[in-house]
Image: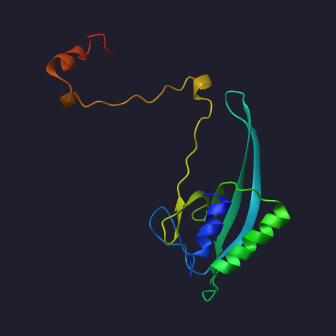
Amino acid sequence: MTLREIKSHLQSLDTIAFQLPNGQFVPSHFHVTEVGKVHKHFIDCGGTVREEEVINFQLWEANDYDHRIHPEKLSQIIALSEKTLNLKNHEIEVEYQGDTIGKYGLEFNGSHFILTNRQTDCLAKDNCGVPETKQKIKLEELGANQQNACAPGSGCC
């Protein structure tokens, strides 16, 4: 989700809720303690220099159970961040404290925000010798002649 998208979604909400990938919700007394611009300048394992920029929201919960951030307040925080940090319409990542600080993607399902799992990946598979994932075929879907052709020692594998 981009900055423009979250601003649009906030306009239609009365309350804000974030759902974790496991289905649980971030407690409703969370705070947005940071909005930041994160610039990453790096080299991948194939030697290519890369850059990426994301907008980071940090969610935090304290023991102030009466606290509730409303869509208007988050919109104000975003507006101040845009002005102060010169934010562009980049993707948003969300940090939230679990067993360790987790970084999540962000989606919207029409009623609340969903924190999505993010995965690492090799950006230079062609330079590293990482083989492409091959499509798996169930043997029962093959005809009898094709099944025998892929028998051990047949030379097809």
Display colour scheme: rainbow
Quadrant where the N terminus is found in the figure: bottom right
Residue furthest toward the bottom?
Answer: 66
Q: Residue at x 56, y 22 (%)?
A: 129
Residue furthest toward the right?
Answer: 84
Q: In the rendered image of this protein, does residue 103 appear above or below residue 64?
A: above
Number of callouts: 0
Quadrant where the C terminus is found in the figure: top left
Q: Residue at x 23, y 14 (%)?
A: 149
The percent position of residue 54, horizontal first and vertical second, equals 70, 53
Q: Is residue 12 left or right of residue 148?
A: right
* Front position in the image: 53 or 100: 53
* Front position in the image: 95 or 146: 146
* Front position in the image: 157 or 77: 77
Q: Residue at x 72, y 27 (%)?
A: 47
The percent position of residue 96, horizontal first and vertical second, equals 62, 65
Q: Is residue 129 left or right of residue 147?
A: right
Q: Quadrant of residue 16?
A: bottom right
Q: In the rendered image of this protein, does residue 58 appear above or below residue 48?
A: below
The percent position of residue 155, horizontal first and vertical second, equals 30, 10
The percent position of residue 89, horizontal first and vertical second, equals 71, 56
